[in-house]
Amino acid sequence: MVPVKTFETCLQAVNDADSAQGLLDAVEDLAELNDQRAIPTLIQVLGFNNPGAAVAAVEGLVQIGIPAVTPILEQLDGYNYGARAWAIRALAGIGDPRGQTLLLDAAANDFSLSVRRAAARGLGTIRWQDMPESKRDAAMVQSQTVLLQVTQDDEWVVRYAAVVGLEALGLTQAETDKILQSLSHLKHHDDTAAVRARAQWALEKLAPH
Amino acid sequence: MSGVPHNPDGQPLTVEQALININQTADHGFRYYAAWWLGKMRIRRPEAIEALLVALDDETDRSPDGGYPLRRNAARALGKIGQGNNNVVSALINCLRFDDYYVRETAAQSLESLGDATAIDALVALLDGGVDAAVEVPGKPHLVHPYNAILEALGTLGQGKKELEKELAAIVAPFLGHAVPQVQNAAARAMYQITGKAHYAERLVQVLDHDQLQLRRAALIDLGAIGYLAGADAIANTLAENSMKLIALKGVLERQLTVQASQQSAPGEQDSLQNSEQDLGPLSDDSRRVMALMDGLL
């Protein structure tokens, strides 16, 4: 008989893991429970320098969603670089408005392209409805300004993510002139065909003929 | 962010300075770095190519193991900037017979990226003796020849050349049974490109389930390089970093865009993907599907 996986047994398995693969498996099981009690452990795993386990932990935190945001933000100053990068990816996936300031900075300035990539996508998919209506427009403009800048990134995948972010933003906004202008420029002039194609697809969705 | 590369002394390099550095022999470090920089920055000037061709014959910059670091960098740079230059192609073909394994490897990779089919015979010659001759060099971390690079180059250069299909397939196929998994993969990749038969690409798709992350990553690179559309979902679901999967899917997407462009454009205009001023034309459903997979990995 397969033993039932409870929060207690999964937590124990993470603590007992003695190999990279063992930790990955245990974190995946813990993350799958979608249990808020797992939040502190999942956050801890972000700092273990085990990319596989960190991916699973990020997925688990994103699945838990809003309740994970406060603990992630509270512990941010104590993170090493790697943990901070994973935390930003979790915040980008959750889309809580409280993470926006961090994403704005990360999309434009982070050293790691995978963090810039995740942050750029996340800037377009913030849960605007969770934000007071009076602040919403200004916050969207902030996302837009940074994303327009990120379309100039050196790395194709970050520009690609900026296009995806701008598309999502454009679909929630009434005023899309600047977004359309930027996408149209990318469609014709980006030197990576994949980015040109993605910009073209975004334009089809935002300005259907 | 990456940004402009700097000289070893910390100063940003200019084209003028790079050309001075590549043409002097007093400081090996500066020359070595300039060779890399000219390729990285795609400086397609005749004087840059000329200087790199000279560097390809250099005897002075030697590593402790007897290797030729400058030649390696020069061969790599020429693969990035030597398109359409016959002198570059023949110089790189000569490199395939050189003592330094890594110079041969880089030359094979550069010949692949230059896409000049005149290199095929010289690449085939390195496969003399077949799988039986493809053994480890005692005391070195590699086989007698850079088989991966050779097979991959043959696949790319032989792609779509029906008149060579039979001959190339007969030479490459035995390497599907080589003892080293990476060589098997390179052979599968080449066989797919040479014959267009999906079952060769499916071998690479199967490697995406392998226990070893390193082999899964290698298969991602291979599938991206051949742009195997039927592998797109398997690529997206592989247990590996999203960055690797995104690069592989970019390869699949761009292959679709090329196919799409060649179906839409008149003969003779088929390099439109390289021309960033030209429209891609309407997107196919397959292209959209691949982009949707990529979006999910950001």
Image (cartoon, rainbow, N blue to C red):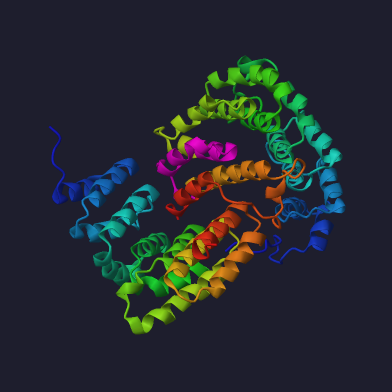
**Residue A151 to residue B225: above or below:** below
**Residue at image coords 72%, 53%:** B275
The quadrant of the rendering that contains the C terminus of chain B is bottom left
Q: Nearer the viewer, residue A26 or B281?
A: B281
Q: Residue A103: give x, y in percent of width and height.
A: 43, 69
Magenta stretch containing residue B26, yes or no?
A: no
| Camera sees residue A112 | no
Please report the bounds of the magenta region as a residue range: B219-243
Main secondary structure of the magenta stretch: helix
Whether residue B292 is visible to the viewer of this picture, yes or no, is: yes
Q: Residue at x 70, y 53 (%)?
A: B40
Horizontal placement of A172 versus A11: left or right?
right
Q: Position of residue B296 (x, y in %)?
A: 42, 53
Q: Nearer the viewer, residue A109 or A192?
A: A192
- Farthest bottom residue in view: A134
User: Is A137 placed left or right of B159 in the picture?
Assistant: left
Find out whether residue B224 is within the magenta segment: yes
Write the residue at 72% across / 22% down.
Answer: B164
How far across and down, in percent of the image, does residue B6 sit?
69, 62
Q: Residue at x 28, y 57 (%)?
A: A63
